[in-house]
Image (spheres, rainbow, N blue to C red):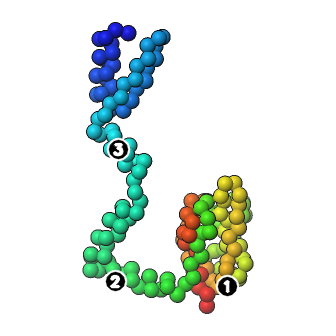
Amino acid sequence: MDLKEIQNLIKFVSNSGVAEVKLETGDVKITIRTTLEGNTPDITYVQSAPVAPVISQVAAPAPAAPAAPATPAAPAADDAKYITIKSPMIGTFYRKPAPDKSPFVEVGSSIGKGDVLCVVEAMKLFNEIESEVSGKIVKILVDDMSPVEFDQPLFLVDPS
């Protein structure tokens, strides 16, 4: 590979927007790295995008609107009388014991203390999540087969 071919390769890589290219031909090894301003920030933001600041920035404009807070305030007050059942672990949420079976509970189901509400799979172990209260399921907050975080609300239960 001569100098002219290497220069053409460098021009091609810098115009293509690729951050790094490694080329090996015979006994020649070439690594070309570009530090284009467009490439580096994109990679940095994708890998280290903070979740909390984005949520707070999105949430901040909502209270500024005078009509918006009045409407959500009523449902929030209604939810206060319910007990929230939360995920005890990180994993995948399943409403059914098997794909061909019916869900453990539905909205409106009466539950007792110790009843199985769902399954959370963590590292190929299926953990049954049991109710710690008796009552009626008011709302299921997570879709079937969705990932859940520790302490994420799963169900709202009316204890009365």
Residue 134: mark in rendering: 1
Q: Alpha-carbon distance for marks 2 and 1?
A: 32 Å
Viewer-side residue, 128 vs 2 = 2
Crowding at label 1, few (<14), some or many (≥20) Cα neighbours within 10 Å? some
Hey, what amino acid is under mark 2? Ala
- Residue 11 at least partly seen: yes
Query: What residue occupies the far top of the structure in this picture?
Result: 2
Hey, what amino acid is under mark 1? Ser
Q: Which residue is mark 3?
A: 42
Residue shown at 71%/60% (left/top)?
A: 126
In primary-sequence order, the first of circles 2 and 3 is: 3
Residue shown at 58%/72% (left/top)?
A: 86
In primary-sequence order, the first of circles 2 and 1 is: 2
- 143 on left or right of 73: right
Residue shown at 38%/9% (left/top)?
A: 1
SS for tag 2? helix
Crowding at label 2, few (<14), some or many (≥20) Cα neighbours within 10 Å? few
Work out whether 41 lies above or below 57.
Answer: above
Q: Which residue is mark 2?
A: 70
Hey, what amino acid is under mark 3? Asp
- Residue 108 at least partly seen: no
